Amino acid sequence: MMTKCSIPIYLGLLSLSACAPSGPAATPAATPATAPAPDTDRITQVSVINALMVGRYDGVMPIPEMLRYGDFGLGTLDHLDGELIVLDGKAFQVRGDGVVSEVSPGRSTPFVVITPFDSDGEFACPEVAGLADLDARLVAALPQKNNFVAIRVDGRFASITVRSVRRQEPPYKPLAEVAEGQSVWTHKDVAGTLVGVRSPAWVVGLNVPGYHWHFLSDDRKLGGHVLDLRVRDGRVRYDVCRDWLVKLDGSTEFNSTELGRDLSRELRKVESSRDGASEKGR
Ligand SMILES: [Zn+2]
């Protein structure tokens, strides 16, 4: 009985002394341990992946506002109008017909993951024969499996298979249905940048667990959501993010949507399926 009572009292004293203001003679205070992490360590996402899965494609955040949260990221545009890539502070759209352009400021995003890319380290990209190989090699190189990691790979790709989806109009169909009509391209010998986010396994329903890669070529003419690749050579840079911000939609529609279902199986198919209309690559 005594022991049980003494613990809370002891903790209470500790917190009291931690809160006590220091007197004028005290040495200058060091940065308090509770200070917020610098923004460079923060990764921000707009909405949650399950909202996209069930067809919530209306824009939640305008593109100019989104760019205040970082210069590196991936997602999609309002109306699910193609793939979104944020690289070096600019937002690019890869439309369903494969055309790449810079996103106009009037557009918005229903889902994006974005961070100020602040490299924590870099290494030569392993020569890999497939996307699964790259993912596995990066697991070994980057053991921070319960943090978010933004990964940038600048390199030459012997081949890269990407997809995009076509703009949708309400009433929206679920993403798994829309993705069945995706366009898939395989480009040979192309230089460009992989924009990747690795999310922890525990983000189920909120984001894409594991790796999510988009691609943009150096000439800004090719890109999309990456389904497969072969790396010739490249440089990996990574940014471990320990601060995670989720911006939620406040609309009535969002709040009347059932988001608690487990859609993991459908998500895996949407993320990695190579089915769809194959079109000629470059
Ligand atoms: Zn994607």
Image (cartoon, rainbow, N blue to C red):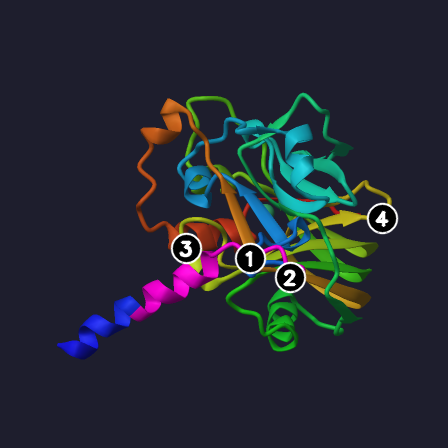
| Residue found 72% across the figure and 53% down from its top | 117
Front position among marks 4 and 2: 2
Determine which of the numbered discs, if any, sits on residue 22 in the image: 1
Front position among marks 4 and 3: 3
Q: Amino acid under label 2?
A: Ala
Q: Are marks 2 and 1 in contact (CB under 8 Å)?
A: no
**Viewer-closest of 101 and 278:** 101
Q: Do the residues labelled 4 and 3 touch (CB within 8 Å)?
A: no
Is 169 on the left or on the right of 255, as rendered?
A: right
Classify 10 Å Cα crowding around label 1: few (below 14), some (14-19), many (20 and above): few
User: Of label 4 and label 2, which has the lower sequence position?
Assistant: 2
Q: Are marks 4 and 2 in contact (CB under 8 Å)?
A: no
Classify 10 Å Cα crowding around label 4: few (below 14), some (14-19), many (20 and above): some
Task: Check disc 2 and report the residue beneath it.
Answer: 30
| Residue found 81% across the figure and 40% down from its top | 221
User: Of label 4 and label 1, which has the lower sequence position?
Assistant: 1
User: Of label 4 and label 3, which has the lower sequence position?
Assistant: 3
Q: Give the range drawn in magenta.
A: 10-29
| Residue found 54% across the figure and 27% down from its top | 59
Is 123 on the left or on the right of 42, as rendered?
A: right
**Viewer-closest of 62 and 25:** 25
Task: Check disc 3 and report the residue beneath it.
Answer: 204
Q: Amino acid under label 1?
A: Ser
Residue at disc 2, secondary structure: loop
Front position among marks 2 and 1: 1
Determine which of the numbered discs, if any, sits on residue 218 in the image: 4
Classify 10 Å Cα crowding around label 2: few (below 14), some (14-19), many (20 and above): few
Front position among marks 2 and 3: 2
Q: Amino acid under label 4?
A: Asp
Q: Do the residues labelled 3 and 1 touch (CB within 8 Å)?
A: no
Residue farthest to the front, as pictured = 25
